Image (tube, rainbow, N blue to C red):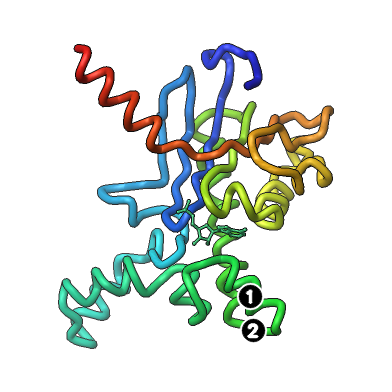
């Protein structure tokens, strides 16, 4: 889409769907990600906690008698936007609750965006700079407010969102012409990525 060689671009992709993760991409290869042993690590998600202090788990096991199965269910299905807001894992419903004055819903969105900013910063540090920031998946493609708030944190390095473009449909550049970082919204096509990998294995 940019007509540029991947080798000259330092890219951070923000996959913000029900599951959320970032990737830092250099020379066309992912060199860092917010995911860990499983996708549970890193960003706060729809119903997954993202990174938490491991001491919380030890505390719940020792002091409250939680089992591994209970902790797994809490971390994967009852945390994140859903757990903090008490409303839903769906950002649309969380934003509706915020409009209705729900303070827990506001806290959930604030935490979600704060984590997003922190981890984008971590990815930029891994790359030693940033040329392109990409938003994708359900939230990344459809929530201009999340993109605007995340991007505002990087105004210090010359990143400038074009607010008009930010409200337009996906698959385009949404940064202003003089922004130091190109910001894009690109539709997630996981099915195509999987098909391409399978094709390469099949043809090997
Ligand atoms: P995905 O996993 O990529 O299908 O993303 C699903 C999530 O995207 C939903 O749970 C919603 O939180 C979010 N989403 C979808 N559409 C919108 C929208 N118009 N505004 C805000 N969030 C949205």
Whether label 1 touches label 2, CB < 8 Å: yes
Q: 157 above or below 100?
A: above
Q: Any mark on residue 150, and which? A: none
**On screen, residue 77 above or below 19:** below
Q: Is mark 1 on a helix, strand or loop?
A: helix
Q: Where is residue 162 shown, x and y percent of the image? A: 81, 40
User: How many numbered callouts?
Assistant: 2
Quarter of the rendering occupied by the N terminus:
top right
Residue found 48% across the figure and 33% down from its top = 24
- Say which quarter of the image contains residue 204: top left
Image position of 52 (left or right of 43): left
Instruction: Check disc 2 and report the residue beneath it.
Output: 102
Q: What element carries label 2?
A: loop
Q: How far apart are marks 1 and 2 (CA)?
A: 7 Å
Q: In the displayed structure, does residue 149 sit left or right of residue 139?
A: right
Q: Is mark 1 within 8 Å of ligand 1?
A: no
Ligand 1 image position (quadrant) = bottom right
Q: Residue at x 83, y 28 (%)?
A: 177
> Disc 2 beta carbon < 8 A from ligand 1?
no
Q: Position of residue 151 (x, y in %)?
A: 69, 46
Q: Residue 106, labelled with which disc?
A: 1
Please give the name of the residue rendered at 38% of the width and 36% of the height, measured from the top-left corner.
191
């Amino acid at each position: 889409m940019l007509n540029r060689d991947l080798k000259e671009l330092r890219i951070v992709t923000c996959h913000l769907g029900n599951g959320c993760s970032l990737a830092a991409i250099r020379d066309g290869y992912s060199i860092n990600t917010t995911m860990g042993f499983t996708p549970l690590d890193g960003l706060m998600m729809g119903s997954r906690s993202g990174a938490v202090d491991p001491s919380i788990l030890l505390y719940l096991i020792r002091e409250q008698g939680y089992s591994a199965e209970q902790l797994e269910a809490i971390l994967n299905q009852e945390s994140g936007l859903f757990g903090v807001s008490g409303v839903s894992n769906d950002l649309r419903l969380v934003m509706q609750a915020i409009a209705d004055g729900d303070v827990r819903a506001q806290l959930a969105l604030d935490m979600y965006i704060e984590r997003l900013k922190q981890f984008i910063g971590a990815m930029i540090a891994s790359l030693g700079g940033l040329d392109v920031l990409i938003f994708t998946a359900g939230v990344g493609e459809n929530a201009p407010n999340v993109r605007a708030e995340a991007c505002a944190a990087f105004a210090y390095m010359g990143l400038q969102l074009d607010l008009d473009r930010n409200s337009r449909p996906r698959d385009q550049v949404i940064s202003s012409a003089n922004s130091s970082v190109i910001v894009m919204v690109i539709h997630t096509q996981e099915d195509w990525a999987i098909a391409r990998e399978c094709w390469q294995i099949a043809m090997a």
